Image (cartoon, helix red, strand yellow):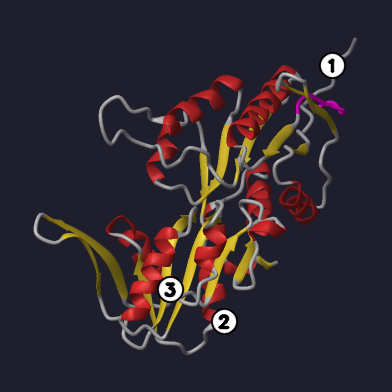
Amino acid sequence: MTRRAGSVAPRLMLVSGGSHPELAERVAARLGTSITPQTAHTFANGEVFVRFARSVRGSDVFVVQTPTEPVNSWLMQSLIMVDALKRASAKRITVVWPFFPYSRQDKKHRGREPISARLVTDLLSTAGADRVMTVDLHTAQIQGFFDGPVDHLRAQPLLAEHIRSAHPGADITVVAPDSGRVRLAERWADLLGGRPIAFVQHRESLQHGRSTEIVGDVLGRHCVVVDDMIDTGATMAGAARLLRELGAAQVIATATHGILSPDSRSRLASGDIAEVVVTDTLPAPPDKRFPRLTVLSVAPLLADAIHEVFEAGSVTKLFDDPGRGEHE
């Protein structure tokens, strides 16, 4: 047999888990491709099976999955998909996790605690992932846990563009819900054109117990409370209540990841918060929706980042372009 000179360029292939098919379809549409068909089912005892219906040999494969609840089931499905791709001779496997699971467990606060975010990255490496793509990690240090390239995408420009267009000319103060989010608030302040910042300070004393106060000017201002995720909504609701008591004209709550656990809907739909803005890194089914919730799509950002990785281009240049978002 005569070998052909040169090598065949790898194909871009997109595969999707079952946790957030709507986002995967939006990414595929932006890329002008389709989701690779697969057979996936769960056995009676809960074990997961995946088999791809097309050859992936020599391909550059992107696995789009969002480990939402039940987190462990979707995490395991991701690992099994990666293992199947590796054993089918995919040339490169990139795990696209818009929301990184266990990211809040990135360090030990006390003895005998796990560092679960590190464990998750070790599982990805063992399964065969070559690269990870994610959006707005809880802490940037998680990038160093994975022994390979990590594309850390930023959704804040998309969220900030929505705030600018929805509140033109407003006197905005960016508010960190606690001292740990001050750096995030500073980044937001720059995105909004150098706005002032404030933060919620929690104090503990033997005399007065736990007290909460606002550091910064909020009187008569539109306060944008920023965080990377909204889970129970208690932090946002508490900050909004305090801001309104101190004379804030309006409170807007923003975060990249809308986990929106049970009871968060009732807290966030209170009269203290004028609007809650999140992205679709996590699904927002009807039971989590309420009239004041706005969901922006990160599909254009993910798709363009995938394109840049596939073409060996620059992912960094995408961070500052708010035009890659879509309103849902």
Q: Residue furthest right?
A: 1
Q: Say which residue label 3 marks.
A: 224
What is the number of the mark on residue 3? Answer: 1
Mark 3 and mark 2: span between their CA atoms? 12 Å
For the question of whether residue 156 can be seen, the reply is: no
Mark 1 and mark 2: span between their CA atoms? 60 Å
Closer-to-camera residue (5/60): 60
Which amino acid type corresponds to the residue marked 1 in the rendered image?
Arg
Asked whether 79 falls inside the magenta stretch, the response is no
Q: Tag 2 or tag 1, which sits nearer the N-term?
A: 1
Q: Say which residue label 2 marks.
A: 166
Mark 1 and mark 3: span between their CA atoms? 62 Å
Q: Secondary structure at mark 1?
A: loop
Residue drawn at (48%, 74%), measured in percent from left and top? 273
Q: Secondary structure at mark 3?
A: strand
Which amino acid type corresponds to the residue marked 3 in the rendered image?
Val
